[in-house]
Image (spheres, helix red, strand yellow):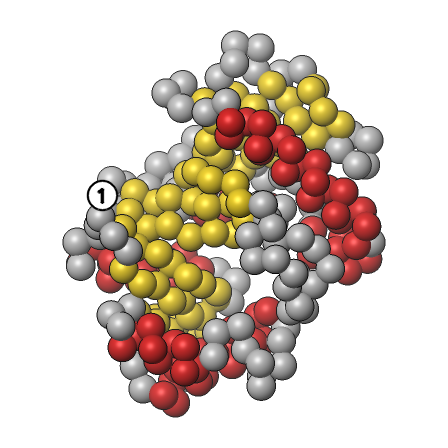
Amino acid sequence: MTAGLTIRTVHDVARLAAVAGYFSDVWQTPRAAPPYPAEVLHSLVHAGGAVHAAYDGQRLAGASVAVLGPEHSTYSLVAAADRGLGHAVKLAQRDWAAGLGARTMRWTFDPLVGRNARFNLVKLGAVGTEYLVDFYGPMSDGVNDGDESDRLTVTWDLTVPSASYEVTAHGPVIRRAPDGDPLARRDPAGRYVWCRVPEDIVKLRAADPALALRWRHAVRDVFLDAFTEGFRATGMSRDGWYTLTREGAGA
């Protein structure tokens, strides 16, 4: 939490419009076509959801949207913040959800974006529980255009302190990446699979969309096979390696 940062729920049309504009800037869409229009945000708030806005002084520096789900769960539809503020925004979402009795929160993110994986799995201690192939279909924003929209669902337990662990990739290579280096390794004991992602998929997608798509398909194959065997995503190293842990294996 930085000095001067305040986070609060917003309800009025003007502030919701500012949040919609902020999301447009993050996803590089025209202000006239935001990914979450103000009227949609207003409807979600009216239906019992929450839009949190983070202000650094008077400047809008982050926002998130969440709705209540069934069976004491919450769905975080979208969250974005200036660098260094994302943790505070997610904690505000968690406090709101827990205050309404929710025990878990779920959301999705692009599994090829390593920094987001590290934030979700390591910083927050959420677990990747479902791999979704081309979840949104074609996307035309400035971040995802030209790629298939695979997403990893993460589940965050709101009832226990955040905890995560990482196990260094050390098993034999079982697949090669599009760049020729190791893509996936497997623990001979069968407890872990490790999968590498590109250093910066957003830059790669802009520079070489065909290569980015090959990475997409390669990582997808590793995750789908691992999830079928009962693995879940539990960690992400600083050098871009996911740790996938077989359920019940422990650290």
Q: Residue 199, how many percent across, how many down?
A: 69, 45
Tell me if mark 1 has few (under 14), some (14-19) or many (20+) residues whose alpha carbon lies within 10 angstroms of its own: few
Relative vertical location of residue 159 with respect to residue 140 in this rendering, above or below: above
Q: Quadrant of residue 195?
A: top right
Q: Is residue 34 left or right of residue 178?
A: left
Q: Amino acid at mark 1?
A: Thr
Q: Residue at x 59, y 39 (%)?
A: 238
Q: Residue furthest bottom?
A: 14
Q: Residue at x 17, y 54 (%)?
A: 101
Q: Is residue 237 left or right of residue 203?
A: left
* Residue 85 visible in image: no
Q: Quadrant of residue 41?
A: bottom left
Q: Residue at x 52, y 52 (%)?
A: 109
Q: Residue at x 38, y 85 (%)?
A: 15
Q: Residue 153, how many percent across, how many down?
A: 46, 46
Quadrant occupied by the N terminus: bottom left
Q: Is residue 31 left or right of residue 89?
A: right
Quadrant occupied by the C terminus: top left
Q: Residue 2, how many percent across, how many down?
A: 39, 66
- 90, 5: nearer the viewer: 90
Relative vertical location of residue 157 with respect to residue 149 in this rendering, above or below: above
Total marks shown come to: 1
Q: Residue 68, how many percent across, how many down?
A: 27, 60
Relative vertical location of residue 112 with respect to residue 202 in this rendering, above or below: above
- Element at badge 1? loop
* Residue 29 visible in image: yes
Q: Residue furthest top?
A: 189
- 235, 178: nearer the viewer: 178
Residue topped by disc 1: 159
